[in-house]
Amino acid sequence: MTHAKTIDRIIALHGETGAAPTRRDWESIMALPDGTPVLILNLLKFIPDTGVLAYGKFVGKVGPAFRAAGGRQIFYGPAQSCFGVHGATDWDAAILSEYPSASALAQMWLHPGFVEANKSRMDGLENSLVMVIRRDQARFP
């Protein structure tokens, strides 16, 4: 399947709401060199009172899709304090995950288990910020 057809299928399933990458976002993601591992840094703001539980349901359901895509969680942690120069600084948690490639990430979004689990993800999040980072450009000590 071509990248364009993959993107069309993802948009048909998830839309372009901001909680899901837009067509332009996917085009940028899929333009990464084939086989280049990608890191996903996700900042999360949960809906008060119910968000953590709903997001927990997502985590419980998404495992098969995450594993099928070759995903690996590097860390998850609650935010103790947040600060910044501009924009949102009120985050509850951060997740850093790695996928073998942009294509693997896209295939996860097409996996029936992710499609189903994503409903719980959306029920749990008030806001999120996702950064896609080429693994070969990341610096770790």
Image (cartoon, grey):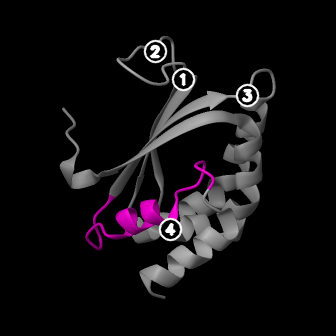
Q: Which residues are magenta?
A: 17-37
x 45%, y 68%: residue: 104
- Towards the viewer: 60 or 10: 10
Say few, some or many: other residues with alpha carbon within 10 Å of mark 2 (under 14 / 14 to 19 / 20 or more).
few
Mark 3 vs 2, N-terminal side: 3
Say which residue label 1 marks: 91
Q: Is residue 133 left or right of residue 124?
A: left
- The residues bearing labels 4 and 3 have C-alpha atoms spaced at a distance of 26 Å
Q: Is residue 101 visible?
A: no
| Residue type indicated by callout 4 | Ala
Q: Main secondary structure of the magenta part?
A: loop
Indicate the quadrant where residue 126 lies: top right
Residue 111 % position (x, y):
64, 70
Cα gap from disc 1 to disc 3, whole angstroms: 11 Å
Magenta run includes residue 6? no
Is label 3 in a helix, a strand or a loop?
loop
- Marker disc for residue 106: 4
Question: Label 1 near label 2: C-beta < 8 Å?
Answer: yes
Could you tell me which residue is drawn at 50 percent across and 38 percent down?
Answer: 129
Say which residue label 2 marks.
82
Q: Could you say where residue 67 lies in the image, as x and y percent from the top left?
A: 55, 60
For the residue labelled by badge 2, is the local secondary structure a helix, a strand or a loop?
loop
SS state under label 4: helix
Q: Amino acid at mark 1?
A: Trp
Rendered residue at 41%/14% (across/down): 83
Q: CA distance from mark 2 to mark 4?
A: 30 Å
